[in-house]
Amino acid sequence: MKKRLAVIGCLIVLIFSANACIAFTEIRNQEYGSLMSAATWSAAAVIGEYGHAIPEDFDRSQFLGVVKDKIPSKSYSLLESYPLKIVPKQGYYLLLVYDPQDNTLILFDYSCTPEVDGPVLLEPGKYDVNNLQLYDKCKKPH
């Protein structure tokens, strides 16, 4: 009888743990979707501000300064909460978004495309994160 109760108890704990993991994954996926939208809106805001004359010293601070009042405030707050790196290119930029916990790349986006170019977190193993230039659709001069 005690053994049966212990097994039932373990099963209950296992079921609740599985549900908690599913809920956490769903919340993370929702936030990630919002992060991708924020990256897309930000590209439009930056292009609206600079056109194809992105400054060579364009960085995280300038990026956040440009998009602050041009995208929804929740999107801005979400972007601001992640480690970001901006790599200016000739006429566009590459946005790199990192996981705040382990500093791994979770998303990348070239500003000239209408969609996020690298949803790394959604498609693990699909992208060669050491050779992002392979995914650069913007290379032609503007």
Image (spheres, grey):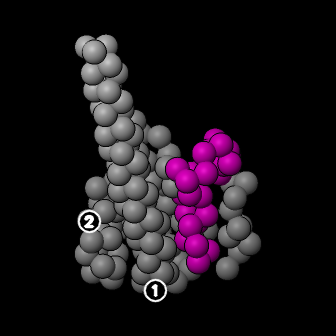
Question: Quadrant of the image for the N terminus?
Answer: top left
Amino acid, disc 2: Ser
Look at the numbered discs 1 and 2 and tell me whether their residues touch, using CB distance below 8 Å: no
Q: Is the residue 38 above or below the residue 49 in the image?
A: above
Residue marked by disc 1: 48
Amino acid, disc 1: Gly
Q: Is the residue 68 above or below the residue 97 in the image?
A: below
Asked which quadrant contains residue 30, the reply is bottom left
Q: Is residue 117 magenta?
A: yes
Q: Residue at the spot x=31%, y=62% of the render?
A: 78
Q: Is the residue 33 above or below the residue 105 in the image?
A: below
Asked which quadrant contains residue 29, the reply is bottom left
Prevailing secondary structure class for the magenta stretch in the rendered image = loop
Q: In the rendering, at what x and y percent does residue 118 appear? A: 59, 58
Q: Which residues are magenta?
A: 108-132
Q: In the rendering, at what x and y percent does residue 37 appear? A: 45, 72
Q: Residue at the spot x=35%, y=56% of the render?
A: 27
Q: Closer to the camera, 132 or 105? A: 105
Q: Secondary structure at mark 1?
A: helix
Q: Is the residue 56 above or below the residue 104 in the image?
A: below
Q: Which mark is residue 77?
A: 2
Q: Horizontally, is 91 left or right of 37 in the view? A: right
Residue 121 seen in render = yes
Q: Residue at the spot x=56%, y=57% of the render?
A: 119
The crowding category of the residue bearing disc 1, from other C-alpha atoms within 10 Å (few below 14, some 14 to 19, many at least 20), is few
